[in-house]
Image (tube, rainbow, N blue to C red):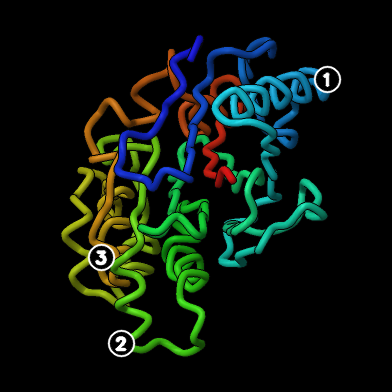
Amino acid sequence: MSHDWIIPDWPAPARVRALCSTRSGGVSVAPWDSCNLGDHVGDEPGAVRANRARFAHALQAAEGDVRPVFLRQVHGTQVLAIDHDTPDDAEADGCTSRTAGLACTVLVADCLPVLLTDKAGTRVAAAHAGWRGLAAGVLEATLQCFSPFGLESQAQKAIKTEVIAWLGPCIGKAAFEVGSEVFAAFTRADPGAATCFAASGNEGKYLADLTALARRRLAAAGVSRIYGNDGSERWCTVSNPARFFSHRRDASSLGASGRMAASIWLVG
């Protein structure tokens, strides 16, 4: 890569490719500088189109003709099976594909991107996991695409043990101060999730470890092979302004923040 974009280091099958952009390598001016891929954050539309073209070119350089499919994310749990007719801006927070050349793509700027594939490389998926979507079950909903038998069963659990996951950059635990409603959203159904929170020093506030919460949800769903973001500071979007966009860091002071993209796709 000519930029500092991230090629996941994980044991993905030979048919699977993945890439996560950073804020470098684009044409947008401040405060979206430089490779903003979000078309909903106030950036010049022409700059966003140029940046998306650069991102698509990087995917194609990795392997042939590839089209990233960009979603309109709403912090929900809807998962979309994409095909060649799927337009950009379809509403969903997760997507999946078994078609070569279609890149499941999520946009982030503090939320956690999660890329998934099975050991055989027959399917890929991507999920946008902010705290709301994560608490509501977006990862579990995305994992259902790897379990084609309907209701949860031991057979489905066995299938999910064949799934591997990669976690991209997100807001780190030292920067993610949340209220009691976030603590309650995770611990209500899973009291053990309290271990992913620490007192922030402000009354009624906690520091939340989004990466640990996602790893906990994946493990509970039967996914044990999880790679990428380990919760260390180098993955924190807030703490690395030269490399990552961060809505929490930038929106209040600069008025806006760009978006990065994480994509996963099959080659045929």
- Asked if the residue at tag 3 contacts the one at tag 1, i.e. Cβ–Cβ closer than 8 Å, the answer is no
* 3D distance between C-alphas at marks 3 and 2: 15 Å
- Residue found at x 36% / y 58%: 119
Task: State the residue in front, 63 or 81.
Answer: 63
User: Is any part of residue 265 visible from this angle?
Assistant: yes
- The residue that mark 3 highlights is 219
Q: Is residue 248 left or right of residue 214?
A: right
User: Is any part of residue 136 visible from this angle?
Assistant: no
Label 3, secondary structure: give it: helix
Q: Position of residue 44 (x, y in %)?
A: 80, 20
Q: Which amino acid is tagged 2?
A: Gln
Label 1, secondary structure: give it: helix
Q: Which amino acid is tagged 1?
A: Gly
Q: In the rendered structure, which disc, 2 or 1, sits on the residue that comes first in sequence?
A: 1
- Residue found at x 25% / y 65%: 219
In the rendered structure, find residue 154 and report the number of the disc placed on it.
2
Q: Which amino acid is tagged 3?
A: Ala
- Residue found at x 52% / y 27%: 21
Q: Quadrant of residue 239?
A: top left
* 3D distance between C-alphas at marks 1 and 3: 42 Å
Q: Is residue 185 left or right of residue 261?
A: left
Q: Is residue 14 above or below residue 132?
A: above
Q: In the rendered structure, which disc, 3 or 2, sits on the residue that comes first in sequence?
A: 2
User: Which class describes the residues within 10 Å of circle 1: few (<14), some (14-19), or many (20+)?
Assistant: few
Q: Position of residue 118 (x, y in %)?
A: 40, 59
Between tags 1 and 3, which lies in front?
3
- The residue that mark 1 highlights is 46
Q: Position of residue 176 (x, y in %)?
A: 34, 41
Between tags 3 and 2, which lies in front?
2
In the rendered structure, find residue 202 and report the number of the disc placed on it.
none
Q: Is residue 84 left or right of residue 118?
A: right
